[in-house]
Image: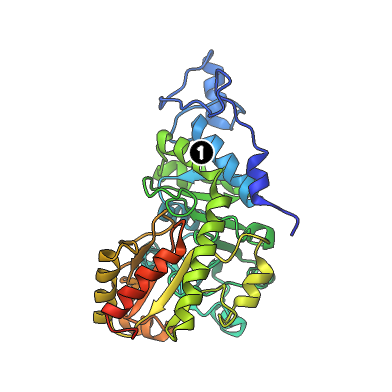
Amino acid sequence: MSFNPASAIQDLLVFGEFGDVNPSVTDSVTYTFLSPQRMEEAFEHEIEGCFLYSRHWNPINRYLSQALAAMEGTEMAQVTASGMSAIASTILQLCATGDEIVSGRTIYGGTYALFKNLLPRLGITTRFVDITNLDALTKAVTPKTRVLYAETESNPLLEIADIPALASFARAHGLKLVVDNTFTPMIISPAKLGADVVVYSLTKFANGTADAVAGCICSTTELVRELTDVNSGACMLFGPVLDSLRAASLLKNLHSLHVRMRKHSDNALALATWLKGRGLRVHYPGLADHPQHALFSRLKHAGIGYGGMMTLDVSEATTARELMRVMQEELVGYLAVSLGYFKTLFSAPGSSTSSEIPPAEKAAMGLSDGLIRFSVGLDDDIGRTLTRLEKSLQRCKLLA
């Protein structure tokens, strides 16, 4: 692909009101008008450069949204207060009572809980399938299906979605393809591969400093205007507004994302290769034996790697707990949920970020209680980290 998300952001210049290289943060929730007629017009339709109320738009959120749209190659974007609010707002804008969703079964636990437990109370139901199986997808679609939902790289099993194939399937069945790209920003551009909507938890890699909760919806101008419509927009009426100071911080961090993703990827590949070489059960899309390694290689942008997420399966929950405790003692990283931080984070998703998924369904999808998910950090000397990891594994008798 000729599209370069890093270059798209680099070419976006935003000046503060005094020519600042960082755009000014407007510390205001409401905005004045020179005439009542102009205010009335703002309620009827969007006016370029004119702001009404910060639940709708404010300047810094607009700038961040423009940067994210540029990064994803979409017409427009809308930032929100969290990744879950981005997902929920998107679904509630696209679906109504009686509609159905077909979703990948290996998705983030919070998204699973939204689809499985909350949306049915609103009359919206979901069928969970193996999205790598087009026959299963075909069987799951009904005349009521409106949305096909997938994660570019699934959480936590790191399955890779064939986005072009899913996009073709969605078009053939009159569905909207919504793709969560949280794990793979800058690496894969779902909209350029046919996705109708790209959603993010900006909290993770996009921000990179674990100090802000935020989300984003990247799509067409039409959908974003529907989301922000004062009378019927899910983002407008549910009000998941991102704080202006956090938006300003995110916008600055976004400019280093391509550098960070390369380092995350290099370090994750080093750890995964080392673990694999010692006979441990490691899962990383950058390894040749990953089931979708060739697919990932075909979909991703060149020169940026395979991302910072990997898993290690030690079979038993008790073993996983002890290893994580020891790894924190040995300064490998932090025992913590979330991902995309500059330090390595590790957790057992079966009992944390995927705990919402029932045991039988975890077993069906291959989510082991002994699975440890790593978000590999930006360690300068990865060799030192490997030495600490080796000592941790030896202490837990997983290595001689």
Question: Which sits in the foreground, 156 or 50?
Answer: 156
Identify which amino acid the numbered label 1 is placed on.
Lys
Query: Which colour assignment does the render follow?
Result: rainbow
Residue at left offset 24%, top offset 75%: 322
Please identify the quadrant where the C terminus is shown. bottom left
Instruction: Give above or below for 116 relative to 14.
Output: below
Instruction: Give above or below for 56 relative to 81.
Output: above
The percent position of residue 65, horizontal first and vertical second, equals 55, 41
Q: Secondary structure at mark 1?
A: helix
The percent position of residue 100, horizontal first and vertical second, equals 50, 69
Locate residue 353: give its quadrant: bottom left
Instruction: Give above or below for 51 relative to 80.
Output: above
Give the labeled residue for mark 1: 252
**Residue 115 seen anywhere in this rendered image of the structure:** no
Locate residue 67: give its quadrant: top right
Residue at left offset 28%, top offset 73%: 351
The percent position of residue 301, horizontal first and vertical second, equals 67, 61
Residue at left offset 50%, top offset 25%: 24
Please identify the quadrant where the N terminus is shown. bottom right
The percent position of residue 235, horizontal first and vertical second, equals 46, 45
Question: Which sits in the foreground, 48 or 328?
Answer: 328
Question: Which sits in the foreground, 263 or 299?
Answer: 263
Left or right: 230 in relation to 218: left
Locate residue 299: give its quadrant: bottom right
